Amino acid sequence: MAIVGRVTHLAEILRGSADRALKEFDLHYTDLDVLATLRRSGEPFSLTPTELTRSVLLTSGAMTAALHRLEKKELVKRAPEERDGRVRTVALTKSGVKLIDKAIAVRFADASRSIQVLSDEDRAQLTRLLRTVLVSLSDHHKQRKRRSRSPSRVDATNG
């Protein structure tokens, strides 16, 4: 319980620090994540909402809200895909590219300050340990999700 409590508390502190660092850009952490994912996708900095949702790990409702906020600020634009007009894509605008380039530099500096107390060896060890827990929990979560989606079966012996 002590580990989970500390990780939860640390997550709250880090999220708050990120939000404060991004305040000058009028961005929330999830908005930064969406913009950064689009930026990492390479020219033309465009993905479908489904691709974004998978990468950013937001629910579809949270992704819709983030895209709406970002579109309202003219940082992204949504348009029909060229190959299949039924599919919509989300792309960074020119102002979106400029903003994410500035905001990500500020965010990285903030993140670096957050862990400067750790030696390189401690960082590497913590990274390995957290990855192990994340992979385990992610696999467990995927299995539970699959089970909840599969149709319930009636046991033939119980009727």
Image: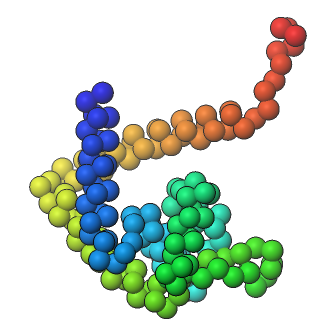
Colour convention? rainbow
Looking at the image, the residue that sits furthest to the bottom is 94
Question: Considering depth in this image, is 157 or 52 the residue closer to the camera?
Answer: 52
Q: Is residue 28 left or right of residue 5?
A: right
Question: Considering depth in this image, is 139 or 28 the residue closer to the camera?
Answer: 28
Q: Is residue 12 left or right of residue 67?
A: left
Task: Count all numbered tags in the image, as a single digit.
Answer: 0
153, above or below 131, in the image: above
Question: Considering depth in this image, is 117 or 90 the residue closer to the camera?
Answer: 90
Decide if residue 37 is in sight here. no
Q: Residue 56 at what x, y percent from top left?
A: 51, 61
The residue positioned 60% from the left and 64% from the top of the image is 64
* Quarter that holds the C terminus: top right
The residue positioned 34% from the left and 78% from the top of the image is 25
86, above or below 123, in the image: below
Decide if residue 140 is in sight here. yes
147, above or below 130, in the image: above
